[in-house]
Image (cartoon, rainbow, N blue to C red):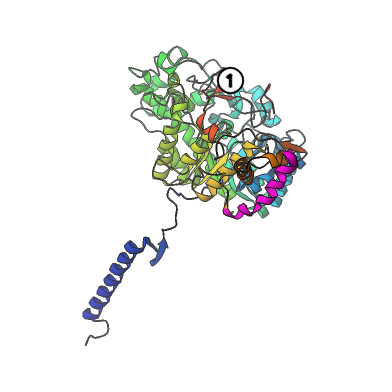
């Protein structure tokens, strides 16, 4: 009775669609399933067997040693040991590894004379192990930061220019020149045999792409672009040679190129006096190890940071850093154009002073984040413009682990930057700032990676610091790391990691034989049935078995609980802060045994 395409036919089709949807909704309620609409097609997703508190899995990478490629020889420092370590990481469940590609190693012989020998060897080993590789374009010096256990300077021919012109390096109020990274004031100055720093960075990245084009993205999947000291987009406001945690640091804008730029900016803004009177004098801002609350510039009440002149200076100081990052990432986009590789850039976790109004340590590092001014949104938007990951540090730290007098809140800072990156349309990745091997550290990293307490939206990836003998000890440290890898792969915590799987219970005879060999037949017979059952259950678990490594046998520590690491979870040592120590970690440890520490 309805004409084709008529109003009545369309009405009946619409009613049928609504009835189907209503019936589907009823079935979903009865059978505990949900309907997802993807590309216009409805599908049923069962939830009955999905465990609670499950999050999206997070790819886990492990940072290699800073001197993986020997600084002088440009070959792998320990190829045999590294091959074994990579296979162990694969066995543990890691997705891949991260390595610094040092400017001072690859282009050491002269301008545009690139030698990739050591990195060729590394890429081959990583590929053989079945892992992926994140490469850091390290345009900075190694040495002078927390965890730097070796010294790799900038290329000699670059440093020679600095010997005659000290202003190419960042400079503080006392004219201390920081040679970790070239000052952003010379970004467009052709001082290096006719090339600017931006030209040198782009040429280096182009050469990298041309050499490794066949390994992108089969092995090399990410290029993290270094934008400052330690590869982080910041000023070198807290060098270890002059600074102790939790000092406020110093502004780094006293080289003549940055001073000239400040004067020009002040004239354009109609504040010529600010160009001559600023940056603030150390009498106002203090020196590296001052508490911000004891200075006239950073104090919360009536501080100069909150005046019109102070706001102008801080805006110029932070925007200069963002413009530098924008310029370098633009060159990186050109260099990597046409290649399926993810770009990334790192922001430092300046967590001390975060609970003050002025956030002094963040201000001196170039992050204009304080009471009344949010500082990370502009950085995230700039990264999003270049489709670069926002990589952040200190994901292993908890607020309660920090002393009150440091005004530190690392967990709050991580949550702040994660939300800011998400709202800016920028992918977020993370790292731990200091080595952690304990269960509390892994739990905090998992919670931050999955945003467990902040909506449950997992981050893009996580890089663990750092590979070393302490991690692959074949004992409790490795077991805890394997547990962490499993949690990151599955997206859920494993509180009962050492519970015996049903599939392994048939191994009881072999375990009894193991006890007999270990204790002798007479002693094994004398064991009560209850004790035998308990010991066999212990040995059946991954964490309770005697584990072996090459030519070494590791005895596991005494255990008092059925779950791996229970004792470690209950006991957390209070932090001891000393000169050269940041939040309880010894500077220069870098994944190896610290001086005086047993291996």
Q: Quadrant of the N terminus?
A: bottom left
Name the main secondary structure of what is drawn in magenta. Answer: helix
Query: What element does badge 1 sit on?
Result: loop
Give above or below for 47 relative to 12: above
Q: Position of residue 249 (x, y in %)?
A: 50, 20
Could you say which quadrant of the image residue 379 lies in?
Answer: top left
Q: On the rendered structure, is 175 left or right of 314? A: right
Could you say which quadrant of the image residue 156 lies in?
Answer: top right
Q: Nearer the viewer, residue 455 or 269?
A: 455
Could you tell me how many numbered marks the image carries? Answer: 1
Could you say which quadrant of the image residue 353 lies in?
Answer: top left
588 in the magenta segment:
no
Q: Position of residue 111 (x, y in %)?
A: 70, 37
Q: Nearer the viewer, residue 36 or 277?
A: 36
Q: Nearer the viewer, residue 53 or 232?
A: 53
Decide if residue 202 is in sight here: no
Q: Quadrant of the C terminus?
A: top right
Give above or below for 286 relative to 33: above
Residue drawn at 57 percent across, 54 percent down = 502
Q: On the rendered structure, is 113 left or right of 136? A: right
State the extent of the magenta-drawn residues as a range: 502-522
Crowd class of label 1 (few under 14; some 14 to 19; many from 20; radius 10 Å) = many
Where does label 1 land, which residue?
580
Decide if residue 73 is in sight here: yes
Q: On the rendered structure, is 223 left or right of 6? A: right
């Amino acid at each position: 009775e309805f004409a084709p395409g008529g109003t009545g036919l369309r009405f009946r089709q619409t009613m049928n669609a609504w009835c189907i949807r209503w019936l589907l909704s009823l079935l979903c309620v009865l059978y505990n399933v949900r309907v997802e609409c993807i590309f216009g097609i409805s599908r049923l997703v069962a939830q009955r067997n999905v465990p609670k508190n499950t999050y999206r899995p997070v790819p886990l990478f492990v940072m290699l040693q800073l001197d993986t490629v020997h600084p002088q020889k440009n070959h792998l420092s320990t190829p045999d040991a590294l091959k074994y370590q990579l296979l162990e990481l694969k066995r543990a469940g890691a997705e891949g590894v991260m390595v610094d590609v040092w400017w001072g190693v690859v282009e050491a012989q002269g301008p545009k004379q690139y030698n990739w020998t050591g990195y060729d060897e590394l890429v081959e080993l990583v590929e053989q192990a079945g892992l992926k590789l994140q490469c850091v374009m390290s345009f900075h010096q190694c040495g002078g930061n927390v965890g730097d256990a070796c010294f790799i300077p900038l290329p000699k021919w670059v440093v020679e220019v600095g010997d005659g012109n000290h202003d190419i390096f960042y400079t503080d109020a006392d004219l201390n020149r920081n040679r970790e990274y070239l000052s952003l004031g010379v970004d467009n100055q052709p001082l290096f045999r006719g090339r600017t720093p931006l030209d040198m960075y782009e040429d280096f990245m182009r050469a990298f792409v041309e050499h490794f084009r066949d390994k992108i993205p089969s092995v090399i999947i990410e290029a993290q672009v270094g934008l400052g000291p330690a590869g982080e987009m910041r000023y070198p406001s807290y060098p270890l040679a002059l600074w102790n945690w939790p000092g406020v640091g110093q502004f780094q804008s006293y080289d003549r190129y940055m001073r000239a730029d400040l004067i020009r900016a002040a004239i354009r803004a109609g504040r010529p006096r600010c160009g001559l009177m600023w940056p603030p004098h150390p009498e106002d801002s203090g020196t590296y190890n001052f508490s911000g609350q004891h200075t006239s510039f950073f104090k919360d009440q009536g501080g100069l940071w909150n005046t019109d002149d102070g706001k102008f200076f801080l805006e110029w100081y932070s925007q200069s850093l963002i413009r530098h990052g924008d310029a370098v990432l633009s060159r990186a986009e050109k260099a990597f154009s046409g290649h399926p590789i993810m770009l990334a850039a790192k922001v430092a976790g300046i967590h001390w002073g975060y609970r003050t109004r002025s956030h002094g340590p963040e201000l001196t590092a170039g992050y204009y984040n304080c009471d009344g001014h949010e500082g990370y949104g502009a950085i995230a938007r700039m990264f999003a413009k270049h489709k670069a990951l926002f990589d952040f540090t200190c994901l292993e730290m908890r607020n309660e682990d920090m002393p009150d007098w440091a005004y530190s809140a690392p967990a709050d800072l991580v949550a702040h930057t994660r939300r800011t990156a998400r709202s800016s349309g920028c992918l977020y990745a993370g790292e731990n700032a200091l080595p952690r091997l304990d269960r509390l550290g892994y739990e905090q990293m998992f919670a931050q990676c999955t945003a467990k307490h902040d909506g449950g939206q997992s981050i893009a990836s996580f890089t663990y610091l750092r590979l070393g003998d302490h991690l692959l000890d074949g004992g409790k440290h490795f077991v805890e790391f394997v547990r962490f890898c499993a949690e990151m792969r599955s997206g859920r915590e494993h509180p009962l990691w050492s519970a015996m799987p049903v599939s392994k219970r048939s191994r009881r005879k072999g375990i009894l034989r193991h006890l007999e060999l270990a204790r002798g037949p007479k002693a094994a017979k004398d064991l009560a049935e209850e004790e035998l059952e308990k010991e066999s259950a212990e040995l059946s678990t991954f964490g309770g078995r005697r584990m072996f490594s090459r030519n070494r046998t590791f005895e596991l520590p005494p255990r008092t609980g059925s779950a791996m690491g229970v004792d470690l979870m209950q006991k957390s040592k209070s932090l001891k802060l000393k000169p050269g120590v940041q939040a309880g970690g010894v500077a220069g440890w870098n994944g190896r045994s610290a001086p005086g520490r047993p291996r």
